[in-house]
Amino acid sequence: MHYSFLNLARQALRGHRDWQPTWRDAAPRPRYDIIIVGGGGHGLATAYYLAKEHGIPNVAVLEKGYIGSGNAGRNTTIVRSNYLLPGNEPFYEWSMKLWEGLEQDLNYNAMVSQRGVLNLYHSDAQRDAFARRGNAMILAGADAELLDAAAVRRMLPMLDFDNARFPIKGGLLQRRGGTARHDAVVWGYARGASDRGVDIIQNCEVTGFLREGGRVVGVQTTRGRIGATKVGLAVAGSSSRVAALADLRLPIESHVLQAFVSEAIKPFIPGVVTFGAGHFYISQSDKGGLVFGGDIDGYNSYAQRGNLPTVEDVCEGGMALMPAIGRVRMLRSWGGLVDMSMDGSPIMDKTPVDGLYLNAGWCYGGFKATPASGWCFAHLLARDEPHPVAAAYRLDRFETGHLIDEKGQGAQPNLH
Amino acid sequence: MRIECPFCGPRDVGEFAYHGDATRRPEASTSDATQPFYQAVYLRDNPAGRHKELWYHAGGCRSWLSVTRDTRTHEIFGVTFAAEESS
Ligand SMILES: Cc1cc2nc3c(=O)[nH]c(=O)nc-3n(C[C@H](O)[C@H](O)[C@H](O)COP(=O)(O)OP(=O)(O)OC[C@H]3O[C@@H](n4cnc5c(N)ncnc54)[C@H](O)[C@@H]3O)c2cc1C
Ligand SMILES: [Zn+2]
């Protein structure tokens, strides 16, 4: 189903009786060239680019619930490409460029809004680190501006600049960063893939792998056996569980990350702002709600909901940064299962099992990666070689020591 | 979530620091220690269900504890001093 003014007018005259579903809810066929497990943003984008860029439409996306029911529909929708390390920054900048053309490419309103992402700094040392990061971003073709306190004050006069403990000294601004509508990204990719012949199969949980002489030749699901030449995993927080079905152990811990939204208020925060002295980030949705979050709860969890100490911690961060929000009421909070890798960076690679490919380890930041993740995973699946901007995301890097640890925290997922 | 510290009694989770899968540190002096260390450091247990894990009672007696917890419900089945367990 495609949307236009003409279409809208036509439907209005017919009493809105003829609207069709946006994409086709398919039933499983016996076999496919490629099966993608996981109908989140990454799985659907992979299927879309397989069909569009590589001419492989005989693809199924298998989703255990409904598409977008995982992190794709639970995240705080921040998109940015402000990474430091050479293994990461070109990948995220490629994602940023894909975001910039996404709505034209999909002909779907994903509400991509480049309202800017501002990371605040509170000390000289932090300013120097941000200057270095900004330079790394510029070298990779991204945009970055280092602002002093006066410039930040002009943008966000309500911040607590003279906080006794964490005064705001300035910030690193990426103007091209911003937010997008998470559900619309899922639906847009689903429609694009479905229109090109991809089968999107919901309520279809993968419960095992079909093997032939060690090679994966399909999957066992709650809707029967389905054959495939190649199988790609894009199941985010469930990566360890699904990989275990093929006897693989992954360098991943599953954690819960919470997010929060307040009642709607008048326009207050123009872009995305992050506190540099704690972990707190906030933006305002187009409906007016303040959307914010902070640290993961910090221990292995498959609960998809969080605990109270983290709620308190996040709200304290908010109060330290902008005390003006203290009397705004919180409307809802929720949690999602994030796949924390041991160095904080993703994994996109073939696995030691023939025919099985892995896309995982997105931690709390994989929404921004959705377009490039799909682009590069499709490349890997179609050509059996990594895309140049994702070549560092090897599964064996933990063994060889080629870690991509942006924060330098070591193998301690709750510190990334 | 509360953890019942064998020394301090039941305490709020905020008093504890988490250190993940309670896999034992491999023997370092052997010539083939690289592989066991790689597995202990990076390929940790990540089950949906019972998980044996290390917690440090930072805001209390500062003991290292070995906790068995269900990662889906946060139900805790047992807590012991990690040191006792390894002896
Ligand atoms: C609260 C929260 C806030 C976040 N905020 C941001 C942010 O601001 N910016 C950002 O860049 N990132 C953010 N993230 C991270 C981002 O949402 C994830 O990294 C990203 O969505 C993961 O990729 P996905 O969309 O493919 O995952 P998901 O949507 O989780 O997709 C995985 C799918 O696999 C399915 N699945 C699992 N097991 C099986 C099985 N056995 N068979 C079939 N299907 C299965 C699941 O049901 C799920 O739908 C946030 C995450 C959370 C939880
Ligand atoms: Zn104690």
Image: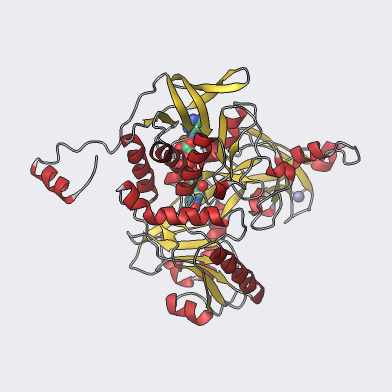
Q: Is residue A378 above or below residue A306?
A: above
Question: Looking at the rendering, which quadrant does residue A399 occupy?
Answer: top right
Q: Quadrant of the C terminus of chain A?
A: bottom right
Q: Is residue A394 above or below residue A116?
A: above
- The structure residue drawn at horizontal position 69% and vertical position 57%, both measured from the top left corner, is A408
In the foreground, A36 or A70: A36
Q: Quadrant of the N terminus of chain A?
A: top left
Please give the count of numbered marks on the rendered protein.
0
Q: Find residue A132 and report its horizontal and vertical position in percent.
A: 62, 69
Q: Find residue A370 and report its horizontal and vertical position in percent.
A: 46, 47
Q: Is residue A49 above or below residue A267?
A: above
In the foreground, A50 or A223: A50
Q: Find residue A41 and report its horizontal and vertical position in percent.
A: 44, 43
In the foreground, B46 or A376: A376
Q: Is residue A335 visible?
A: no
Q: Find residue B63 and report its horizontal and vertical position in percent.
A: 79, 49
